[in-house]
Image: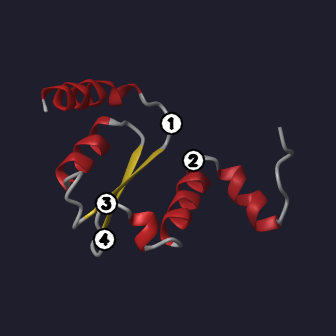
Amino acid sequence: MGGFVAAESAIRDRLGEIGCPTLIVGGEMDRLVPLRDAAQSAWLISDARKIVCSDTGHLEILARPARLPADLRALLDEAVPERAGRRRSGRRSPSR
């Protein structure tokens, strides 16, 4: 277990380096990642939004497949306002 704890600490120590909008999703019934860890991650990442799902565990995307994409779109629309305008008008950005 010591290796896992060390790796977890190393990751936590670097969360403050994340410089882009980040969505933290936590499930109230998650037994792998407690909500306190999700809260700590959201606090350490400067531009993070935290969502707590009251009726799910660790795999929110499987429990509620429509919710996570909608939450991600909202985060992206907020972070890149012109993206929201393109989506509303039906225009797509050119492929790279």
- Amino acid residing under circle 2: Ala
Q: Position of residue 29 (x, y in %)?
A: 22, 67
Q: Which residue is mark 2?
A: 79
Q: Position of residue 53 (x, y in %)?
A: 32, 68
Task: Choose between 61 and 53: the one closer to the eye.
Answer: 61
* Above or below, comparing residue 76 to residue 62 in the picture: above
Q: Which residue is mark 1?
A: 20
Of the residues tagged 2 and 1, which is closer to the observer?
1
Q: Position of residue 71 (x, y in %)?
A: 50, 63
Of the residues tagged 2 and 3, which is closer to the observer?
3
Task: Choose between 42 and 32: the one closer to the eye.
Answer: 32
How far apart, in angstroms, are the residues tagged by discs 1 and 4? 26 Å
Sequence-wise, the earlier of marks 2 and 4 is 4
- Amino acid residing under circle 1: Cys
- 58 left or right, relative to 22: left
Q: Which residue is mark 3?
A: 58
Q: Which residue is mark 4?
A: 56
Dot 4: element: loop
> Pointer 2 and pointer 1: residues touching (CB < 8 Å)?
yes
Mark seen at residue 7: none
